[in-house]
Amino acid sequence: SAYAGKNLRILREAQTSSGSYYQFSVGGKPIGWVETKALGIFYQTSMEKKATGARYIVRGKEGQHAYTLPVAEAAVNKGPLTKWKGKRLIVQREVTVGKEKWLLLQGVGWVKATNVTTVLYNKPMTAYAKVKLAKGKKVWSNPYNTSGYKVVGALSRFTGKDLRILREAQTGNGLYYQVRVSNKTIGWVEAKNVAVFYNPRMEKKEKGTRFVNARKKKQAYYRMPVADAAICCGKLQKFGRKRVTIDRKATIKGQQWYRIKGAGWTRAVNLSTRR
C-alpha cells in the first residue's frame, strides 16, 4: 500500500512454484518483488505500434520533456525539448498509455503527442506563382497529411493561370502554399509544384515622376505588379494629365512595372516622362 498511486517500473518477471512475480522500481530505486496479480499494467512494449511521419515541437512546449519510455517519470526523463525547437523530427512508434497518446521520435525519445505538431508554421504570404509541375499533382483543402486535409482537385486545372499565394505552411511533409485564382481561394499546393514569379523582395526603390500615356489611359493599375482583376484598383484615366510620383519598380515576367505613390502598380509602358 506504500506505493499505491505511484508508477512502478517492472524490471524483471519470475515464475515460481508459488506464482508469478515482478521485480519493480520506483523513481529509479529498486524496491523488491510483488505478485503479478497485485498490479495493473498500464504500459508494456507490446502495446506499441509502428508509426511514420514527421513532427515539430509545438511553440511554447519546448519546456516539456522527452523520456526513454512513454511514462512521465523522473527516472526515465531525457530532458527538455528545447534543443529540438524548429527541427524536423521523425516518428518511429506510437502508443496510447491510459488516455494519453505518445510518439517515439528518432534520436529524441518518447514525447506526449500534444507536445508536437505536423505544422512548424502557417503564416501569411504575399506572392504570385505559375504551375510548374502539374501531372498527377493535387490541390488540398489543408496541407497534405495535416488535420482535415482532403483532395479538392487536380493542379493541372490551373496551368497557365496566375496563382496568388495567401499563406505559407511548413509541415512534416514539406512546404505548402495556400493559393487563390481570381477571387476564389482554391486550396493548398506543394511549393515545389509551382514557380513564384513575384514576391515583394523583387521590388526596388525608385524616384521620379511620370504622366499617364494618353493612349494608355484605359489601362489599369493594381495593388501588386500583376495584372490580376481581383486586385485591380481602377483605370489610369483617373489621373488625367496630372504628374504622378513613382516610388518603386519591379520586373515581372520580363515586363517593368512602376508603383504610383499612394495608388498602385502599372506597367511602365503605360507611363511617360512627357505630358
Image: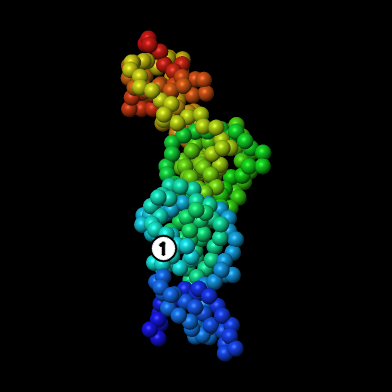
Splitting the image into 4 quarters, where does residue 249 fall? top left
**In front here: 92 or 128?**
92
Relative height, residue 145 to residue 259 (above, below):
below
Can residue 113 be seen here? no
- The answer to whether residue 152 of the structure is visible from this angle is yes
Farthest bottom residue in view: 18
Horizontal side of residue 89 vs 83, given as left or right: right
Q: Residue at x 41, y 67 (%)?
A: 75
Q: Position of residue 51 (x, y in %)?
A: 58, 59
x 33%, y 27%: residue: 262
Percent from the top left, x then y, of residue 226? 48, 28
Q: Compare residues 59 and 51 and report the one nearer the observer.
A: 51
Location of the N terminus (image quadrant): bottom left
> What residue would you read off at disc 1?
77
Q: Is the residue 261 above or below the residue 72 in the image?
A: above
Mark 1 closeness class: few <14, some 14–19, many ≥20 residues within 10 Å: some
Residue farthest to the top, as pictured: 274
Residue at image point 47% right, 45% down: 169
Q: Position of residue 118 (x, y in %)?
A: 50, 52
The amino acid at mark 1 is Asn
Element under label 1? Answer: strand
| Quarter of the image where one finds residue 238 | top left
Q: Position of residue 84 (x, y in %)?
A: 43, 50
Q: Residue, x 48% and y 58% (percent of image)?
A: 109
